Image (cartoon, rainbow, N blue to C red):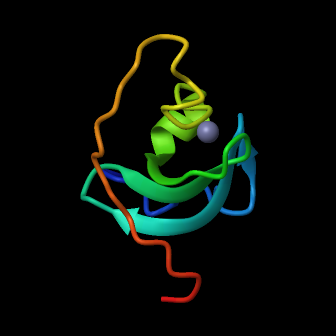
Amino acid sequence: MKGSSPYRIPLEGTTQGYWRVLAYKGCDGKKSWYQCQCSKCGTIKLVRGDKLRSGRSRQCASCGAIQRHEQSTAGAERQNPEN
Ligand SMILES: [Zn+2]
């Protein structure tokens, strides 16, 4: 009986909306997280895999600010090209 699927649909290297999925960053127990770059403005953020696949996240908060202005710096990330 399968509780959780060991399979993960690889999203890295694909484009979801305006997100360019750069890398798989791991799983927090439930959700997979991906490092994504907004192709509009270049912002790099961590985005949940299910949001990417469902299309609920298509771009960064700044570019998606049609809905509302949100300036929550949830994950201030340093962008080291090779870490
Ligand atoms: Zn953007």
Q: Residue at x 75, y 54 (%)?
A: 14
Spot occupied by residue 80 in the image (x, y as percentages of width and height): 50, 81
Residue at left 62%, top 54%?
37
Q: Is residue 43 visible?
A: yes
Image position, residue 43 (x, y; %) = 57, 51
Where residue 71 appears, as percent x and y from the top left, is 33, 32
Side of 55 relative to 3 (left or right): right
Q: Is residue 52 above or below residue 8?
A: above
At horizontal 55% and vertical 13% (from top left) the residue drawn is 66
Q: Quadrant of residue 64?
A: top right
Q: Splitting the image into 4 quarters, where does residue 29 fall? A: bottom left
Residue placed most toward the observer, 45 or 47: 45
Residue nearest the observer in this picture, 49 or 61: 61
Residue at the outermost bottom position: 83
Where is residue 62 drawn, in percent x and y? 52, 32
How many numbered circles does the render carry?
0
- Position of residue 27 in the picture relative to residue 60 (left or right): left
Q: Is residue 1 visible?
A: no
Is residue 46 rendered to the left or right of residue 17?
left
Instruction: Say if 76 sits above or below 38 in the image.
Output: below
Q: Quadrant of ligand 1?
A: top right
Q: Residue furthest top?
A: 67
